[in-house]
Image (cartoon, grey):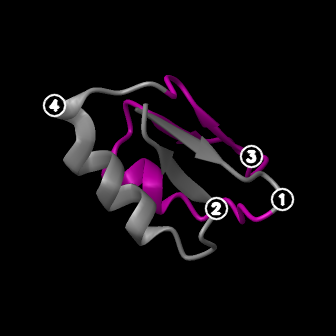
Amino acid sequence: MKVVVDRGRCVGMGICESIDSTRFEVGHDGVMTISSERFDEADRAAVEEAVASCPAGSLRIIEG
């Protein structure tokens, strides 16, 4: 599984970072980066919460 960001939609609020700061980081310039797109079942709950909490709907999970 992996998580991807639509950079055209991301507004850099940092909610994803507050949920999973080991995976998501919003820089001082408001640009969000993902340290590791791939994740396993152990990290699924945090990634799903970050995706569901994104106010811009810029995150999504791709199975496989």
Element type where label 3 sits in the image: loop
Asked if residue 54 lies in the magenta stretch, the reply is no
Q: Count residues near mark 4 (Cα–Cα under 10 Å), then give few for <14, some for 14-19, many for 20+.
A: few
State the residue in front, 38 or 63: 63
Main secondary-structure element of the magenta-colored stretch: loop
Q: Is residue 38 above or below residue 18?
A: above
Q: Quadrant of the N terminus?
A: top left
Element type where label 2 sits in the image: loop
Instruction: Say left or right for 34 vs 63.
Output: right
Query: Mark 2 and mark 4: span between their CA atoms?
Result: 22 Å
State the residue in front, 53 or 41: 41
Question: Tag 1 or tag 4, which sits nearer the N-term?
Answer: 1
| Residue receiving disc 3 | 31
x, y (%) of residue 8? 84, 59
Query: Mark 4 and mark 1: span between their CA atoms?
Result: 29 Å
Query: What residue is rendered at 79% in x and 47% in y?
Result: 29
Question: Tag 2 or tag 1, which sits nearer the N-term?
Answer: 1
Q: Amino acid at mark 1?
A: Gly
Query: Mark 1 near mark 2, Cβ–Cβ under 8 Å?
Result: yes
Q: Count residues near mark 1 (Cα–Cα under 10 Å), then give few for <14, some for 14-19, many for 20+.
A: few
